[in-house]
Each structure stands twice: as C-alpha cells, then as structure tokens.
Amino acid sequence: MRVETYGHSPTNGLTRRIKLIAFLVLGAFLILILRLWDLQILEGERYYSLSQNNHLRLRVAQGPRGFLLDRNGEVIVENRPSFDVLAIPEDVKDLEGTSSLLSSILGVPEEEVRSKIQGARPYQPVLVRKEIDLRLAIIIEERKLDLPGVSLQVRPVRSYPSGQLGAQLLGYVGEISQVQLRREEFQDFRPGDTLGQSGVDGKYEAMIRGVEGGDQIEVDARGRGVRLVDRIEPKSGFNLVLTIDRRLQQVVEEAFAGKSGTAIAMNPKNGEILAMVSRPAYDPNLFAARLSPTDWERILEDSGHPLQNRAFQAQYPPGSIFKLVTTIAALEKGAITPDTKFTCNGSFSIGNFEYSCWKPEGHGTSDLYRAIAISCNVYFYNVALRTGITEIARVARELGLGEPSGLDLGDEAKGLIPSPEWKLNFRRERWFPGNTIQAAIGQGFVSVTPLQILKAVAAIANGGTIYRPQILKKVISTEGEVVEEYGPEVIRRIPFQPENLAVLRKGMWMAVNDGGTGGRARIPGLDVAGKTATAQIIRKKDNGRLLRRDLRDHAWFVAFAPSDDPQLAVVVLVENGGFGGVAAAPVAKAILEAALKPPKGISVAVAPEAKEPVEIGD
C-alpha cells in the first residue's frame, strides 16, 4: 500500500530550525551591540569617572576670602589657617575601627563619626570635624597609617583681630544653613561651606569670596597619596577698602564703653561713614570658629540683642532733636522768624490737657536762637500749632526721616513720621492738636533710626544735600590693583532757603558754646554745633522717678564741626542714659576731638564741665 504526505517534509523542518537559530543568534548579537553602545556611549562618562575614582582623589582647597581694610589701608579683618578632618567613605575599609579611633582623638561620640561617614557618597569627602587645633592635627598625622581614607584639610578661616570692634558693621562669617542651601542663589554651595552672614562680610560676599582650587591625587589601595596628578591653585577674593577710619573707630568704641546704644561719625560732605559702633556687641570670631550650641543660645537669648546694629536696625523717639525739623518747617512756611518770641512758664495748656517743659520753673521769654540752644519745649509747642503737622511731616520726609537710609547692610528699620491720615488709617482715631505738639518735640508717634538722624543733620550742615551713607570706598585685587572705586551718591537736594538753614546752625552753635544744653561738647579752638535730646520712652510718674533702668529716658546728641565748614557729623544715642547733654554729649566730644584736633595722643576721657553756665537738661 502506498502512503502519501502533503505539506511537510524533513527538508522543510530542518530549514525552519536553522532560521530560528539564526534569528536567535542575531537577536543576541543585537542585544550585545546595544549594551556595548549603552556602556560606551550613554554611560561611558559615568563609568570612566568611576574607574578614575578607584585610584584618583580630589582634595578641594578653599580660596581665601578677601581682607577688609580701613580707609588708610590698615587691615581690620583677615584670615588665619585652620584644620578640618575629612574622610572618603570608599577608602575607609574598617568603619568601626576608624570611627572608634577618631572618636577617641577628637572627643566626639563614635556614633556621630560613623553616621557622617555612612551617610556620604562613596567618593565624596565628608567633613568629620571642623576646626581642630594644631595638637589634634599632629596626632592625626602621626596615626595616618591607622586611619586609611582620613585626611586633614588646611582651610583659611575668617579672623577679626580686634574682636568686637565694629562687629555689627563688619558682620560675621558662618556655616551655610539648610534653609540657605535650598535657595537658588546658593545652589553652588555645599553643606559645610561658609559664607558672610551679615554686615559687610555678608553684603559683599560675591566680591570677597575666594575661588576654589584643589589637588588631584593618585592614591594606593589604603587611600594614601602616592602622586600628585594635577593642581588648580585657589584664588583669593578681592580686598575691600572701607570708608571706616580704624583709629577713630577705636576711639568711639572706648568712649562708648559701658553704655548701650550707638554712635556714628560721618563726613557730611560726601556721606562716608568713618566710624559706627553698636553696643552691646559680640565677638565675630565665635562664628568663624566652631560656634557651640551653648554659645549660640547665649547670644540669641541675650536681652541686649548684640546681633542687632542699633545704628539702623533699631528705632527710637528722637526727642528734642526733632525740634530742628519743626524749626525749618516753620521758617519755610513763614509761620515764625528768628526774632519770634514766646514765654515759657514751665507748662503749656490745650483745653483740659497740660504739657510741661523739661525745666519746671520755665525758661522765660526766648527768641528762636535761644529756644534751640536751651531746647525749650513750650517755645516749640507754640511753633508747632502755628506750623501744623502736615508741613512738619513733609519737611521730616524731605530730610530722609521715615525711610531707609540706603546703607543696605541688612534689614533696616523704617521709622515713622505720623500724619492725620496715618492715624486715621492705622489707629482709627482723629488727629488732635496735642498730637501735633508732641510730634513737634519728637515724642508721641514719631520714631527714627540714629542713621536717619545723622543723614538729616549732615544735610543741615552741608547746606541741604542728602547723601546716601557710604561704607565701601574701593575694591582692590590681592596685587593692589583697583578693580572698582566708589564715590559719593546724592539722593536729593532739598530746596530749603539757605538763610533758614543758617538759623539752625547758629542755634546749634549756641547750644554748645553759649550757655545751652550741649556745653559738655565744647572744644577750645574748635567750633562745635550740636543739639541735645532726652527722649521719654514712657510717661513719668508724678515724682519723676523710674525704678527700672530699662524705662529711663534715652540720651541723644548730634553735632558737626567746624560749624562754618563742617568736616565731621556725629550722632550719639545712649539707651536709658538720661539727659542727652550729660550722657551723650561727652561721647561726641571725644569723637570730634580725636578726628579734628591736632594729634597729641588720643584721650577719650569724659569731657570736663563747661566753665560758662549750661542748661543741665534735655
């Protein structure tokens, strides 16, 4: 019998099997090609980097920060060397042993060392301990064979040779915070990096900060360096020449010893700040080193707020210094003349309210010049009602009160120049005549910063030009080449009548030299013009006595000299100091003497009593 088959043969089956095998081989080959392409092209750079890291290490060298110099080229902020302990996790072969040994050397918990090394990237150096002393650095170098993967890094650290001198003005350098690291402007920073956190060091960080360099080193299996492969030299930041005069700054610091408040000296002809003191202060070296949690808590909880720069971050009632504003407003409006007289019997009544003069028995009859000199409250009560709050507030704002000064060294208090509209909007109350006479003598709702007051007094001294306060004079390279230079910046020129400004200057001259309240600032051979103020912070009891020191009056004094060609303007505020003529004027005298008298050695002793009679008050 014959059997026939249809559609299949041994030859056809063999052919299909061969095709299947060929297809599988081709697929495997294609997969291999794609994988090689992935390794060589897509992932080539990463794997090359990993292979290099098996024997190459990068030791980063931080670029030194630029120095801060005073106007005469004297260094006031510099750098010093410090030692940091680093570890590369991949090279730490015995984590337990290394952590234990480092813990015993550095005096830190073993778990802290272990967690830092474990939590870092394998080839990324991790900071184990910052700022160790030379003794510990020598010990680590001696035990280097027992500490594979551990190394020392020499790092420049900010140094403030004079400690608290100009602390809030110069600022401090500290480790970058987690909050800052999340901000876009700090995206190039790493945890553990330091940067300027306040003052000049913070404001001009971009100029001062150095450029990183480093060494690429070949290491052996134990992480020990065997060969330098490449080196990029770190570069120093620019040096900043400030307008500050270090000698004068030291004088102001010493004159202000034991006091709380601020003192500022400025050139009224260009706005350059020559000295700025704020007390209480702090030592910025604490932040440059390893600031302990205990020290940080102590600074934060200090009731004196040492981190605050009282020159422009604190605001106070200006007291009788504001009478200068009231005077110019009245003269510009034509409400009074220099010859206008009022009589003071010690008090002034409006309706059922009585407002006192600082001198209970009164000053008798005075013209405008004498009223400025003796700072008679009753005289200016009368002037205020003739002038009106609208004009007084306008002139105050023209003089730069109630607005930031423009120094731009941190958050700046704005102050307050009140008006009827302000009171209605913010307090839901009408403006009364009593509000006007209180504002006219710098009490009530009025508040200012000492730097605002200095700007205004400088404008009175120079004839009506408001300058932006200046602290940076020029930027120079480490080789001494000038990179950038800065000059005075005029904010505005006030269209006051020259004869009206001359009235203020004469009244201020009399306050110091002709039986006024500022007699303790008199300097033989140097014509000083000044104005005292005693600003209440609460209403006194009937007996005029306050038991708590922090509720006593603030003492103010502003001055410029020489009165006919002013070279220096000064403001002094002594918190809870009492009378301005007693507590603040002698400090201003010490500053003016040191800056303008021929150098015969610097003395900052309290000025002696004036020989002629002076008003002891206000």
Image (cartoon, rainbow, N blue to C red):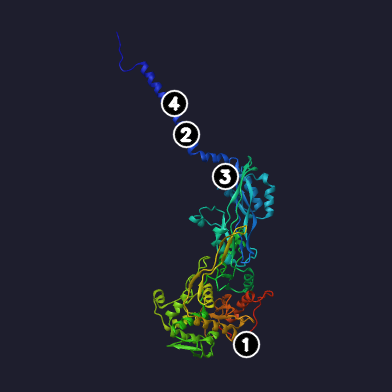
Proximity of marks 2 and 4: CB atoms separated by less than 8 Å: no
> Looking at this view, is 242 or 377 the one in front?
242
Give the residue type at disc 3: Tyr
How far apart in space, not on screen, are marks 3 and 2 (Cα)?
26 Å
- Structural crowding at the residue carrying mark 4, measured as other residues with C-alpha within 10 Å and reported as few (<14), some (14–19) or many (≥20): few
Give the residue type at disc 1: Glu
Give the residue type at disc 2: Arg
Q: Earlier in the sequence, mark 1 or mark 3?
A: 3
Find numbered disc 4 in the image and state the secondary structure of the residue it sits on.
Answer: helix
**Comparing labels 1 and 4, the label whose residue is closer to the camera:** 1
Proximity of marks 4 and 3: CB atoms separated by less than 8 Å: no
Q: Earlier in the sequence, mark 1 or mark 4?
A: 4
Find numbered disc 2 in the image and state the secondary structure of the residue it sits on.
Answer: helix
Q: Earlier in the sequence, mark 2 or mark 4?
A: 4
Q: Which mark is residue 35?
A: 2
Residue 8 as seen in the image, left or right of residue 136: left
Query: If the image is split into quadrants, where does the N terminus sit?
Result: top left
Query: Which residue does the numbered mark 1 point to in the structure image?
Result: 612
**Comparing labels 2 and 1, the label whose residue is closer to the camera:** 1
Give the residue type at disc 4: Val
Query: Which residue does the numbered mark 4 point to in the structure image?
Result: 25
Percent coordinates x, y for residue 590 in the rendering: 63, 76
Percent coordinates x, y for residue 568 in the rendering: 58, 75
Find numbered disc 3 in the image and state the secondary structure of the residue it sits on.
Answer: loop
User: Visible in this render: residue 111?
Assistant: no
